[in-house]
Amino acid sequence: MHGSRIAAVGHYQPARVLTNEELAGMVDTSDEWIRSRVGILTRHIAGPDEPVDELAAQAAAKALAAAGLAPGDIDLVLVATSTAVDRSPNMAARVAARLGIPSPAAMDVNVVCAGFTHALATADHTVRAGAATRALVIGADKMTEVTDWTDRTTCVLVGDGAGAAVVEACAEGEEPGIAPVLWGSVPEMGHAVRIEGQPARFAQEGQSVYRWATTQLPPLARQACERAGLTPEDLAAVVLHQANLRIIEPLAGKIGAVNAVVARDVRESGNTSAASIPLAFSKLVERGEIRTGDPVLLFGFGGNLSYAGQVVRCP
């Protein structure tokens, strides 16, 4: 039980970009209204021929390539998603088939916006227990498929995409690169973020989520830092679920991460649910805004109302 680390990350977004101006021609909204309330400028939209597993596989392939690994090196595939259409085969099995991974354990994790951090913790626990040596952990969602495009309170928020990480066992004596997770939920607030009905549609009680996130999340995030043996001042970056810029920006200050780069990918990607954290994290790595070994807080929150956060070392 030597712990685990993130060896590499990757991300993928569809080519189609939907601007605020285009949305203003679809529903009663405006660029100024969207920017002032949620901080979103654009979002990427998957086409009908781009299912969730394709988004996931594209991001996973990039993470594999960045790690210098072959599909046969992976023995666990975890896909965090809440927008899978079919019950079986699950997205993890479909991703494994797309990538040619021969015989992995393959599981989906549905914790909505906190899905990736839950899946990352699950991979860490599995590697620590010796049940896997290398895992692909993917967050992928096609939120536009569960969106009511006549509802301006939700359709302005969403985007599609995927992000992935390769998790592997640390060498003996190597410091773990994934710290213990801080996770939990507020079941009585489970109704605050929903994807339900026939056909399934995304809905939320925005003010309830905003109040909870801005008041309850900062002490939870500080506890996640404590579990890593760090203070918020030690963080090089903070990657929160990319829900709303009005939530993200104040939270970093309330957490106390005064020296950290704060991910603001929501501006160009919108709310991509389980994809949002690995997508934003991968972009920080790609742009060189954080360096190998830097401590980064990942913290997801949203549907159920569930949350999960951990400090990881940048690959």
Image (cartoon, helix red, strand yellow):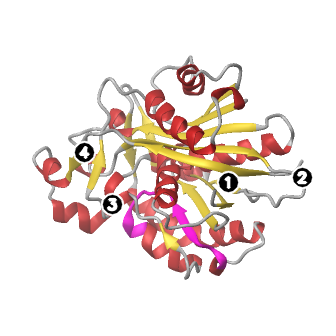
Chain part drawn in magenta: 234-247
Q: Residue at x 46, y 65 (%)?
A: 263
Relative horizontal placement of residue 179, taking residue 165 as reference (left or right): right
From the image, state whether disc 2 or disc 1 is nearer to you: 2
Q: What element does badge 3 sit on?
A: helix
Q: Which percent across, then down, holds residue 150?
A: 20, 41
Residue picked out by circle 1: 184
- Disc 2 or 1, which lies upstream in sequence? 2
Relative horizontal placement of residue 134, taking residue 198 as reference (left or right): right
Q: Residue at x 40, y 59 (%)?
A: 265
Mark-to-mark CA distance, 3 and 4: 12 Å
From the image, state whether disc 1 or disc 3 is nearer to you: 3
Relative horizontal placement of residue 66, taking residue 28 as reference (left or right): right
Residue picked out by circle 4: 17
Q: Amino acid at mark 1?
A: Gly
Q: What element does badge 4 sit on?
A: strand
Q: Is mark 4 in CB contact (under 8 Å) with mark 2?
A: no
